[in-house]
Amino acid sequence: MKQRNMTKLFRTILTTNAPKFVSTPTFIRKLNNQIPTKEVQIPVQYGHIAGKLWGSGDKRPILALHGWQDNAGTWDPLIPMIIKDRPILALDFPGHGFSSWTPGLTYNEWEWPRLILYLKEYFKWDNVSILSHSMGAIAATRFASVFPEDIDFYIAIDSFILENVNTNTLVEKIYPKLLQKAFVTDHWLDKEPPSYTLEEITNTWHLATRKSIALDSVKHLIKRGVKQSKTDPNKYYFSRDPRLKYVILIPEDRKFTEALVRRIKCPMLFLKATDSPFSAGKFSIAMREMIEKQNDKYEFHFVPGKHHVHLNNPELVAPLINNFLHKHKLEA
């Protein structure tokens, strides 16, 4: 695609209020046109949590939780294929998409399930239902483990726990580098970050995920993930909190992780992308085998594709999700 045409395409995506699916199958566009959507803002102490609500009615929505450095746009291709009578609320995690940044502190992985608890209490829900990917799936697993009576089901795509890591490597190499970079980043949070053309943004996003997000899929994330430069109107910058790149992940040993997964009681669907390095090690395999032994409502499937298979190839994921929801009578 020539640069002029690509620029025009992405400007259209960024300026329209209605969901836009470019170069997607006609039946997906027709489905999307029939589904009402609206932007929501949920107040928190440091600002708001943003979300995109799909569907209408007074039923409790399914929460859709995205992966690290993605945003609610990650669900745009999939939701039209699975939404039925219940609305789906696709959230932007703090620091991502249209949500506020957390002030003063770095992000950590136990804030994610705490946010789910906050939403449950804010909306006065009896239970929570979750559709999740990667970081969002880790959050869902922790919530389901700590509050097993407060979740009626969750779907995890390509991750559900943090991988077991070498603690010596963390202490000697990773932590010092992350802390130093986070410290430097704190000093220029109020400055506009480097800006790029939309074509450069697209290529960078694609390559930064090791090509897990297909070039044609980046458009679904761009609308919530970039802002126009104030110094050069022809360029854009990544609008997520730059401190997200330096999240300190605290290693959790096998005994602790086992204590978590043993408490999962609700129906759980785990979809593992075959070409993804995540949740592929012996530690993750052992944990999902443990869930399978102690939870007869657990279901597992391999899906051909990369880590963002739900975004690149939703037609491979949707039937498995629909069958799972129908099997456990979770559609209403």
Image (tube, grey):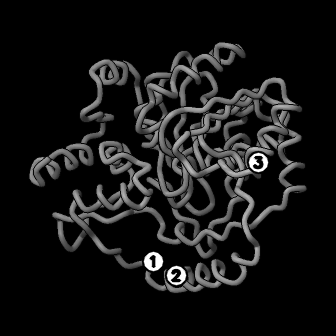
* Residue at x-position 41% and y-position 48%: 213
Q: CA distance from mark 2 to mark 3?
A: 29 Å
Q: Amino acid at mark 2?
A: Asp
Amino acid type at mark 1: Leu
Q: Which residue is mark 1?
A: 189
Could you tell me which secondary element the residue under label 1 belongs to?
loop
Q: Badge 3 is on which residue? A: 142
Does the CB distance between marks 2 and 1 fall below 8 Å? yes
Q: Which quarter of the figure has residue 272?
A: top right
Q: Residue at x 40, y 53 (%)?
A: 211
* 2 vs 3, front mark: 3
Residue drawn at (58%, 66%) of the image: 102
Identify the image quadrant of the C terminus: top right
In the rendered image, residue 134, in percent from the top left (x then y), is placed at: 59, 48
Q: Earlier in the sequence, mark 3 or mark 1?
A: 3
Say left or right for 215 vs 247.
Answer: left
The label on residue 186 is 2
Q: Residues within 10 Å of mark 3 (few under 14, many from 20)?
A: many
Image-quadrant location for residue 23 = top left
Q: Amino acid at mark 3?
A: Arg
Q: 67 above or below 293?
A: below
